[in-house]
Image: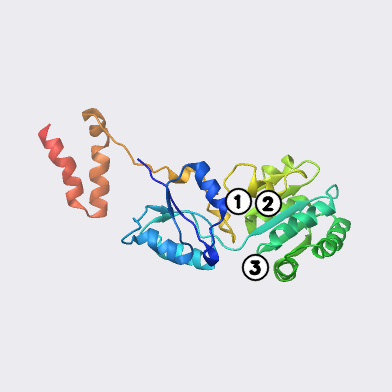
Amino acid sequence: MGEIAISVPTPRNEVNPYVMAAIEMLGVKEVYRMGGAQAVGAMAYGTRTIPRVDKIVGPGNIFVATAKKLVFGEVDIDMIAGPSEVLIIADKTANSRFIAADLLSQAEHDELASSILMTDSAPLAVAVQKEIKVQLSGLKRKGIAESSIKNYGAIIVTTGLGKAVQLSNEIAPEHLEVLTRNPFALLSGIRNAGAIFLGPWTPEPLGDYAAGPNHTLPTGGTARFFSPLGVYDFVKRSSLLMFSREGFMRLAKTVMTVSEIEGLNAHGNTIRVRLAKN
């Protein structure tokens, strides 16, 4: 039967009551008071008091991400996640205040976070730039958001929405918002994104806090080959084979031919001894 263990950091030796309430609601009984790279190591290799696990999932800082990378192979992991990022594709119908707020919601995460707007409307680009300055002044984490926007933010005016989608697929953002007149018209062209938010009433924090899908997402372009964390990550498959005599006979010659080409005579012999019995 599957077991779930949770590692909970307690900065300054303080237990977060909201996290503990969530654990209680989930009914998880195995909880360890630790965090960071040391928690990853303890769960990957086991200690006198902490059993080793088979899979480690969840986001963290650069030390957690590096630790997960190092223990991969000893255990499975979900992905190696980096700083948060959002890319917004918008047309002239989009609300500049909404866009500025959504860009800043990622920028306040981390000075290394990335917030990018792509639009085919130059007037919208100018309006968003002005609105960002206005909204920045009221943020509690202004310094962090300002640094993020300055160093890793961008507003790009494209020749069309199709070009914006093309560039977005190359970037493969963690979060992709589509704020256009008809966002579903672009959806079929989007290939690489961790989570896609369609329309003006679907800001990214809905996904963070309330919408339902898991929000451990691929970052740094890894959405080209990683998917969001989901229940399927905890499903392990085994191949199952059973041949009848007739089925065996249909493939016997193929297996012997390939084994000879590969130079693995004993492989072919598993077929020959059965043919001899017939």
**Residue identified by numbered label 2:** 176
Residue 225, above or below 237: below
Q: Is disc 1 in contact with disc 2, using a CB cutoff of under 8 Å?
A: yes
Circle number at residue 243: none
Q: How is the image coloured?
A: rainbow
- Label 2: state its secondary structure: strand
Give the mark nearest the N terminus, 1 or 2.
2
Neighbours of disc 1 within 10 Å: few (<14), some (14-19), many (20+): many
Answer with left or right where residue 257 lies relative to residue 12. left
Query: Residue 100: percent from the left, percent from the top?
Result: 79, 57
Q: Residue at x 47, y 42 (%)?
A: 27
Residue 39, above or below 230: below
**Residue identified by numbered label 1:** 194
Foreground tag (1 vs 3):
3
Q: Residue at x 38, y 56 (%)?
A: 75
Direction left: furthest residue:
277
Residue 13, above or below 52: below
- Label 3: state its secondary structure: loop
Residue 50 visible from this viewpoint: yes
Q: Amino acid at mark 1?
A: Gly
Circle number at residue 112: 3
Q: Residue at x 44, y 62 (%)?
A: 39
